[in-house]
């Protein structure tokens, strides 16, 4: 009877040790599996963020290129405006204004403005500065265009308006 209880006790201890060992192995496997899943999710997220940033950069590149093309075209047509074989730019009454804006409200900059900070600081600052300059040019273009419209429609203008239009 004592030998039987001793055998049962040994079996119980082996079973208890097996259960503890199984729990440790199962817990470790679960922990490693969870770590692997989280690591894969983080890698996928990083890859998606990199791809998003690449797409934003490409879209902004296209927007900047379009704006630069518009500005370059505006500047390239200036020499062709002549009056009496002299540059029309020398005429104090001359102004040139184009109606279409260089940067529309629906510009990609408006869409991606918050994402620009995700680029490195040098790129972000260059983009912000470029678009600030475009906004300033656009404000000046709009003023000059409206000034020209006033003249065409015979509305009153002030000498300051003419001075300001020539500053742009």
Image (tube, helix red, strand yellow):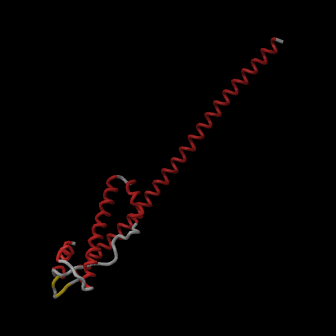
Residue at the spot 32% in from the left edge and 63% down from the top edge: 131
Residue at the spot 78% in from the left edge and 18% down from the top edge: 8
Count up the numbered dots: 0
Give the position of the C terminus as an image quadrant. bottom left
Q: Quadrant of residue 73?
A: bottom left
Q: Quadrant of residue 14?
A: top right
Residue at the spot 70% in from the left edge and 27% down from the top edge: 19
Taking the view exactly as shown, the residue that stands out farthest to the front is 156
State the residue in front, 107 or 77: 107
On the rendered structure, is 59 left or right of 149? Answer: right
Percent of width and height locating residue 99: 32, 78
Residue 25's place in the image compared with 160, above or below, is above
Percent of width and height locating residue 23: 66, 30
Percent of width and height locating residue 108: 40, 65
Give the position of the N terminus as an image quadrant. top right
Q: Quadrant of residue 102?
A: bottom left
State the residue in front, 107 or 63: 107
State the residue in front, 46 or 109: 109
Taking the view exactly as shown, the residue that stands out farthest to the right is 1
Residue 47's place in the image compared with 138, above or below, is above
Percent of width and height locating residue 26: 65, 34
State the residue in front, 163 or 99: 163
Taking the view exactly as shown, the residue that stands out farthest to the top is 2
């Amino acid at each position: 009877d004592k030998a039987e209880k001793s055998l049962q006790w040994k079996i119980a201890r082996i079973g208890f040790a097996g259960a503890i060992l199984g729990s440790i192995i199962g817990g470790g496997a679960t922990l490693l599996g969870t770590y692997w899943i989280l690591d894969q999710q983080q890698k996928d997220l990083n890859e998606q963020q990199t791809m998003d940033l690449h797409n934003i950069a490409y879209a902004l590149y296209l927007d900047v290129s379009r704006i630069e093309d518009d500005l370059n075209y505006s500047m390239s047509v200036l020499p062709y405006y002549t009056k009496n074989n002299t540059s029309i730019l020398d005429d104090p009454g001359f102004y040139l204004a184009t109606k279409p804006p260089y940067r529309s409200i629906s510009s990609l900059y408006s869409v991606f403005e918050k994402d620009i900070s995700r680029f490195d600081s040098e790129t972000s600052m260059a983009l912000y500065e470029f678009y600030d300059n475009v906004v300033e040019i656009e404000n000046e273009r709009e003023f000059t265009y409206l000034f020209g419209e006033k003249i065409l429609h015979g509305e009153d203008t002030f000498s300051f308006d003419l001075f300001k239009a020539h500053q742009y």
